[in-house]
Amino acid sequence: MKLTLEALKGAGSFTGRPVEKEIKWRQGSRDFTATVFVRPMGYQTAVSDVLSFNGKQDSIAGKIAASICDESGNPVFSSPMDITHGPLDPVELEKDPESTKRLGSLDGRLSVALLLAIQEVNDLGKTTSSPTSKSSGTNSSSQVSAAPRSRKPRKT
């Protein structure tokens, strides 16, 4: 295949529209349900992964910030810092337009719910092989083909 925009479109190489997901989480004693839109992993996620690999941002916060969007695909979070430290505090900004005070990190259970939605969207259509059955019996094939264990005493 010659790498052209038309060839890439034909191969489905663009992430497409955001996927609508319903998430649920508990915060304190209250249960919440929300509709979120998840952008399938693409360029933004790749950039986020590279930045986290280089130690420039938190990898989980970067994945959430790159993936969670509105129905038009616009990001909900302006940066991973919105997740790790919260957005700028509007009350403090009202008092002082140059305030850098933030609301605090995103709730942990909400973060997990968002990550699960991201995983579901990006695993759609993928099949996983069934887990290999493991036997604990002495006649298992893995023990027959395994090398004999050393009889040397362990050093302590």
Image (spheres, grey):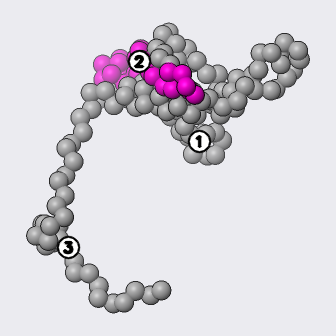
Q: Which mark is residue 152?
A: none
* Residue that numbered label 3 is attached to: 146
Residue occupying the point 41% across, 18% down: 21
Which of the two labelled residues, at mark 2 and mark 1, occupies the earlier sequence position? 2
Q: Residues within 10 Å of mark 2 (few under 14, many from 20)?
A: some
Asked if 155 appears above or below 32 in the picture, the reply is below
**Kind of residue at badge 2:** Lys
How far separated are the C-alphas under marks 1 and 3?
Answer: 39 Å
What secondary structure is marked by label 3?
Answer: loop
In-front residue for pair 6/88: 88
Q: Which mark is residue 21?
A: 2
Magenta segment boundaries in residue numbering: 6-31
Determine whether, in the image, residue 156 is placed left or right of residue 143: right
How many numbered badges does the structure rendering display?
3
Mark yes or no: residue 17 visible.
Answer: yes
* Residue that numbered label 1 is attached to: 52
How far separated are the C-alphas under marks 2 and 1?
Answer: 26 Å
